[in-house]
Image (spheres, grey):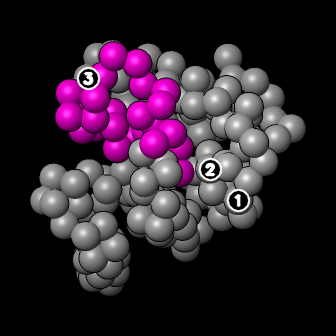
């Protein structure tokens, strides 16, 4: 399992999702897009205007940073876990919103010590906010399957240990 999660919120996960979505849509390097987003946020906050709503506190920015850097470093493994647990869909067929919500959530499951029910709840909220009518249910189902798979994975391969089974 990974490091302890920095304190953060749904807004941090939304920021990570929106940054990943922007990078994927533009076929741009994720960390370059993230650098630009952070610069925009700093500039907007200096002017007293935040394009992402209320100003994000340091812990929220730290959580978004950890999630995006972890995904950038471990993308093939995160995507393999997802591909192995999504039945009947390829990444090309899926909604890009759902796919990127799932990528952020699986990254958090694999790299941080956030309890799976919290990760799933936050991902479902983001999916419902930005996705289609069935996005919340789809994300919930995929993540429940991912959590079961990670629990049964050999130690050192992203296994989840000693955490409750998702609902």
Residue tagged 3: 132
Dominant SS in magenta: helix
Circles 2 and 3: CB atoms closer than 8 Å: no
Q: Residue at x 43, y 54 (%)?
A: 76
Q: Nearer the viewer, mark 2 or mark 3?
A: 2
The front one of 106 and 131 is 106
N-terminal of the pair, mark 1 or mark 2, is: 1
Q: From this viewpoint, is residue 31 visible?
A: yes
SS of the residue under disc 1: loop
SS of the residue under disc 3: loop
Q: Which mark is residue 2?
A: 1
Quadrant in the picture for residue 111: bottom right
Tell me residue 30's x, y (percent). 30, 67
The front one of 153 and 107 is 153
The front one of 111 and 43 is 111
Q: CA distance from mark 1 to mark 2?
A: 7 Å
Q: Which mark is residue 110?
A: 2
Tell me residue 35's x, y (percent). 32, 78
N-terminal of the pair, mark 2 or mark 3, is: 2
Q: Is residue 93 magenta?
A: yes
N-terminal of the pair, mark 1 or mark 3, is: 1
Tell me residue 91's x, y (percent). 28, 35
Please give left or right for residue 42 compared with residue 62 in the image: left
Q: Residue at x 62, y 50 (%)?
A: 110
Q: CA distance from mark 2 to mark 3?
A: 26 Å
Tell me the quarter of the image containing the N terminus.
bottom right
The segment highlighted magenta reads 80-107
Tell me residue 68's x, y (percent). 44, 63
Q: CA distance from mark 1 to mark 3?
A: 31 Å
Q: From this viewpoint, is residue 11 visible?
A: no
């Amino acid at each position: 399992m990974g490091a302890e999660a920095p304190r953060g919120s749904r807004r941090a996960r939304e920021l990570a999702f929106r940054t990943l979505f922007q990078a994927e849509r533009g076929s741009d390097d994720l960390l370059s897009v993230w650098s630009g987003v952070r610069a925009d946020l700093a500039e907007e906050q200096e002017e007293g205007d935040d394009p992402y709503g209320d100003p994000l506190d340091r812990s929220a920015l730290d959580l978004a940073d950890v999630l995006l850097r972890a995904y950038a470093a471990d993308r093939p493994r995160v995507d393999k876990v997802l591909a192995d647990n999504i039945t009947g869909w390829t990444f090309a067929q899926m909604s890009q919103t759902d796919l990127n919500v799932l990528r952020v959530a699986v990254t958090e499951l694999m790299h941080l010590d956030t309890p799976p029910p919290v990760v799933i709840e936050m991902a479902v909220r983001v999916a419902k906010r930005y996705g289609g009518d069935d996005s919340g249910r789809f994300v919930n189902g995929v993540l429940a399957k991912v959590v079961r798979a990670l629990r049964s994975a050999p130690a050192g391969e992203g296994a989840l240990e000693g955490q409750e089974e998702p609902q």
